[in-house]
Image (cartoon, helix red, strand yellow):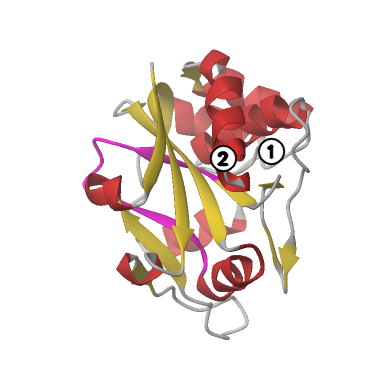
């Protein structure tokens, strides 16, 4: 086996026993205990990252992975690996990956770049937004982002309250298939500077990249 295929074998074996039923409040409280990204609205990605890192750290993966500029990948074995989570029944089947330039550099250095992608069924906040209110109270009140949103009269997105992990896709990107990814152009930073574009993958057509799958 090539080195990245050995990585894939370890990943598929290690993540077979991962927790598949995620309660939003419990997950956020776990993240809070770790003092890691517990204030973030999109908790499913951060929680999946923590679960993966715990399993892969036991298998000799470096946590975190290599760093390119300001971008630090989640883990490293023979190649860099990023962990991502996507709600499969959302309006979009596209998942945003990471900084294009950093991924290109990762491929240049190691030949391939890996993505561990969780596909989840999720449930959302009720009409009273009780989960959202609970999270805001836990954080000590409305964030500046929320206050600015209210001033703009912008609609608040419904929060994910729980998630069920259905599948994990193990994806490898290399020089032969990276051009098949979409480019996600972001807006601007708070200082007005443009954000760097990120790669984006169409989950429905991930078979062109997929090299491993774990079904639950």
User: Can you say whether 9 is above or below 95 in the image?
Assistant: above
Of label 1 and label 2, which has the lower sequence position?
2
Q: Which residue is mark 2?
A: 1
Q: Which residue is mark 1?
A: 140
Whether label 1 touches label 2, CB < 8 Å: no
Which residue occupies 49% across, 19% down? 22
Which residue occupies 72% across, 74% down? 69
Magenta segment, prevailing SS (helix, strand or loop): strand
- Counting from the top left corner in percent of width and height, residue 82 is at 58, 49
Q: 135 or 35, which is in the foreground?
A: 35
User: Can you say whether 119 is above or below 111 in the image?
Assistant: above
Q: Which residues are magenta?
A: 83-99
Which residue occupies 47% across, 16% down? 20
Residue 59 highlighted magenta (yes or no): no
Secondary structure state at the residue bearing disc 2: loop
User: Can you say whether 107 is above or below 18 in the image?
Assistant: below
For discs 1 and 2, the disc positioned in front in the rendered view: 2
């Amino acid at each position: 086996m090539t080195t990245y295929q050995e990585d894939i074998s370890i990943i598929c074996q290690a993540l077979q026993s991962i927790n598949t039923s995620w309660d939003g409040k419990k997950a956020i409280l776990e993240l809070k205990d770790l003092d890691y990204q517990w204030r973030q609205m999109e908790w499913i990605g951060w929680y999946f990252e923590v679960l993966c890192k715990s399993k892969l750290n036991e298998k000799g993966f470096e946590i975190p992975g290599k760093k390119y500029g300001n971008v630090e990948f989640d883990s490293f074995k023979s190649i860099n690996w990023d962990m991502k989570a996507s709600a499969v029944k959302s309006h979009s089947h596209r998942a945003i990956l990471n900084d294009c330039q950093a991924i290109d550099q990762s491929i240049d250095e190691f030949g391939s770049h890996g993505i561990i992608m969780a596909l989840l069924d999720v449930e959302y906040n009720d009409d009273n937004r009780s989960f959202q209110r609970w999270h805001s109270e836990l954080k000590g009140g409305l964030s500046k982002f929320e206050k600015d949103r209210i001033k703009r009269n912008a609609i608040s997105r419904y929060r994910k309250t729980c998630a069920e992990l259905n599948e994990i896709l193990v994806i490898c990107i290399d020089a032969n298939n990276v051009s098949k990814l979409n480019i996600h152009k972001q807006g601007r930073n708070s200082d007005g500077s443009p954000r760097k574009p990120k790669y984006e993958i169409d989950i429905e057509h991930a078979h062109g990249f997929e090299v491993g799958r774990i079904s639950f």
